[in-house]
Image (cartoon, rainbow, N blue to C red):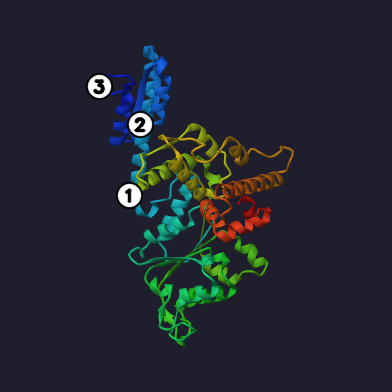
């Protein structure tokens, strides 16, 4: 379960032993013993992966207490790994993590929805896992043996999106030198996930309405329709009902889409899941990057529990990745994750003046977060908007909209 070792030993010293242990058993908890004059060496041991150190001479009770804490850490790490492995056994819920009431509702709804073949509309903020839920629905459905095709609608220009979805005949337009099968035909007997469907044009809405009503498509340049057996799962971070009121979205199309609605909660709505989500992401990415499994320091976890997380789980994942890459020990600190004391204060939810109304306080907090968060990201990569968008987990266009709203200019960081 753990190792208790002295720093000064004959033959092999404690630091050399620690390096060997971490090389062979990277997750093993190591507690070092040191004389008072060797404190600097003990601190160096912690930097190399030791859990803690105890100074000699020590009394029996102090040693027992340290050992109990170290053993408790080992037990919790093992329990977390077992829970994560159990979750990984269920392929459908592979990357959906959380045991809160909010997430339990999501799991239950997914299981109910998966049993049907009706159209699904998943709503929620960016970064909440709408894409993961769409795949889970497919994996648990009767179509799981068929194809699952995901389309990021805003990422494809309108004229290209139409030909990608429905295909085209040779000669339908310039450069159409051969027939092309559309994604709906490729998804036959399976599911198609239309991500961010709230951003598509009225023209595409009309064509998709036909698919929903008639279960058929018409490739560009063709006079005949083609029947397709496809389940449509769509998602959006927009308020489509508001867009309908502004005549920006087809009402008939919305009601055809919104047969089975599923709302994904923001991370702010289930903060109690942050420790287990962080643990899952740590193990997932440490394994992927072939690094020893790390853990989050209590100080950093305290900050995590208070942050706004406007980018939701995707933002948390980016912070975890930075921590893994920059941490030199098995404990990730706020500095490793790129969160200084000043930055953490800017991101905490308990910022506004208590005299403000809820609405004004919320607006002030979000404005401050947006401005400081985006400025810090741009500053860290020399004003590269494309790289900043990737770090934020946002589309480049979405990041530029936020920058314009707050008067942030990329050139100011170059």
Residue 377, placed above or below residue 170 = above
**Earlier along the polypeptide chain: callout 1 or callout 2?**
2
Q: Residues within 10 Å of mark 1 (few under 14, many from 20)?
A: few
Name the outermost residue toward the front.
414
x, y (%) of residue 85? Answer: 33, 44
Label 2 residue SS = helix
Quarter of the figure with the N terminus: top left
Residue located 57% across and 76% down the image: 203
Residue 382 seen anywhere in this rendered image of the structure: yes
Are dots 1 and 2 in contact, CB under 8 Å? no
Residue in the foreground of this view, choosing between 323 and 263: 323
Q: Is residue 187 left or right of residue 235?
A: left
Label 1 residue SS = helix
**Earlier along the polypeptide chain: callout 2 or callout 3?**
3
Estimate the spatial distance between the alpha carbons at disc 1 and disc 2, rounded to whole Å.
21 Å
In the picture of the structure, the residue carrying the numbered disc 2 is 75
Residue 99 seen anywhere in this rendered image of the structure: no
Circle 2 or circle 3, nearest the eye: 3
Q: Is residue 398 left or right of residue 405?
A: left
x, y (%) of residue 231? Answer: 43, 68
Q: Quadrant of residue 2?
A: top left
Residue 159, placed above or below residue 409 = below
**How many marks overall?**
3
Label 3 residue SS = loop
Name the outermost residue toward the right.
355
Q: Which numbered tag is attached to residue 11? A: 3
Q: Which numbered tag is attached to residue 89? A: 1
Q: Quadrant of residue 80?
A: top left
């Amino acid at each position: 379960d753990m190792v208790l070792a002295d720093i000064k030993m004959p033959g092999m010293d404690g630091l050399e032993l620690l390096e060997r242990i971490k090389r062979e058993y990277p997750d093993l908890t190591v507690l070092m013993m040191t004389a008072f004059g060797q404190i600097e060496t003990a601190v160096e041991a912690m930097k190399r992966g030791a859990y803690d150190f105890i100074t000699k001479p020590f009394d029996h009770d102090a040693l027992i207490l340290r050992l109990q804490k170290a053993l408790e850490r080992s037990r919790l790490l093992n329990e977390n790994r077992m829970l994560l492995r159990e979750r990984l056994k269920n392929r459908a819920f592979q990357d959906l993590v959380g045991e809160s009431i909010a997430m339990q509702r999501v799991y239950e709804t997914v299981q109910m929805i998966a049993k049907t073949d009706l159209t699904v509309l998943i709503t929620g903020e960016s970064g909440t896992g709408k894409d993961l839920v769409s795949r889970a629905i497919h994996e648990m459905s009767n179509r799981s043996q068929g194809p699952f095709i995901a389309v990021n609608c805003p990422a494809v220009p309108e004229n290209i999106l139409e030909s990608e979805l429905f295909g085209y005949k040779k000669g339908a337009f310039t450069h159409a030198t051969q027939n092309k099968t559309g994604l709906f035909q490729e998804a036959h007997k399976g599911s198609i996930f239309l991500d961010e469907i709230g951003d598509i044009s009225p023209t595409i809405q009309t064509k998709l309405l036909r698919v929903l009503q008639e279960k058929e498509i018409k490739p560009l340049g063709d006079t005949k329709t083609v029947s397709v057996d496809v389940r449509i799962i769509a998602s959006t971070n927009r308020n489509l009902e508001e867009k309908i009121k502004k005549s920006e979205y087809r009402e008939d199309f919305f009601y055809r889409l919104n047969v089975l609605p599923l709302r994904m909660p923001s991370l702010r709505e289930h903060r109690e899941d942050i420790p287990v989500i962080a643990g899952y992401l740590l193990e997932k990415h440490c394994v992927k990057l072939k690094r020893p499994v790390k853990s989050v320091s209590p100080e950093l976890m305290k900050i995590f529990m208070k942050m706004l997380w406007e980018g939701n789980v995707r933002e948390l994942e980016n912070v975890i990745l930075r921590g893994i890459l920059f941490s030199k020990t098995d404990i990730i600190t706020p500095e490793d994750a790129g969160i200084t004391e000043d930055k953490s204060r800017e991101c905490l939810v308990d910022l506004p003046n208590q005299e403000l109304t809820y609405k004004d306080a919320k607006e002030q907090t979000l404005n401050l977060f947006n401005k400081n968060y985006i400025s810090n990201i741009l500053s860290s990569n020399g004003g590269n908007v494309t790289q900043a968008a990737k770090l934020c987990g946002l589309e480049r266009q979405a990041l530029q909209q936020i920058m314009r709203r707050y008067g942030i200019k990329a050139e100011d960081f170059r």
